[in-house]
Amino acid sequence: MISVTDSAANKVKQLLEAEGDTEMALRVAVRPGGCSGFSYEMYFDGDINGDDIKHDVDGVRVVTDPGSAKLLNGAVLDYKDGLQGAGFAINNPNAQRTCGCGQSFS
């Protein structure tokens, strides 16, 4: 399953509070597409499927569909806020190759 750093968990909590619905889960998925073959997708989701893989990380509910979970096993979701930009990033040991933009992998 994907791990979430403290920095990412804190940012997700802030975003959920801004949405006004702290009961939603963070869905992390892998979809076909992008210039390297697969791309990451993250969004807040209130519809949790029975076969979703669920776990809590520092008070943040994270869900992943079974197909994506295989490609995200051992990955780490982080959040950086610095002079070079701010945003979420996934460090995925299963990625053999990433594209120049960092948004897709194979």
Image (tube, grey):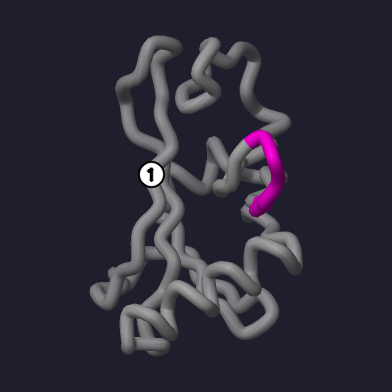
21 with respect to 68 (left or right): left
Q: Nearer the viewer, residue 10 or 49?
A: 10
For mark 1, does the 10 Å Cα neighbourhood hold few (<14), some (14 to 19), or many (20 or more) residues?
few
Q: Nearer the viewer, residue 60 or 17?
A: 17
60 with respect to 38 (left or right): right
Which residue is depicted at the point 66% across and 28% down?
Answer: 94
Which residue is depicted at the point 45% across and 73% down?
Answer: 15
User: Considering only vertical position in the picture, is 55 above or below 32?
Assistant: below
| Residue type of the residue flagged with mark 1 | Glu
Q: Which residues are magenta?
A: 78-84
Q: Quadrant of residue 37?
A: top left
Q: Main secondary structure of the magenta part?
A: strand
User: Considering only vertical position in the picture, is 100 above or below 95?
Assistant: above
User: Considering only vertical position in the picture, is 22 above or below 1?
Assistant: below
Residue behind mark 1: 41
Q: Position of residue 58 (x, y in %)?
A: 69, 80
Q: Residue furthest front?
A: 83
Q: Position of residue 22 (x, y in %)?
A: 41, 88
Q: Residue furthest left?
A: 47
**Figure disc tally:** 1
> Is residue 80 magenta-colored?
yes
Q: Secondary structure at mark 1?
A: strand
Q: Position of residue 6 (x, y in %)?
A: 75, 68
Q: Nearer the viewer, residue 71 or 62?
A: 62
> Is residue 23 magenta-colored?
no
Q: Position of residue 59 (x, y in %)?
A: 62, 85
Name the quadrant of the N terminus: bottom right
Which residue is depicted at the point 34% across and 34% down?
Answer: 31
16 with respect to 12 (left or right): left
Q: Nearer the viewer, residue 20 or 55?
A: 20
Which residue is depicted at the point 67% across and 51% down?
Answer: 81
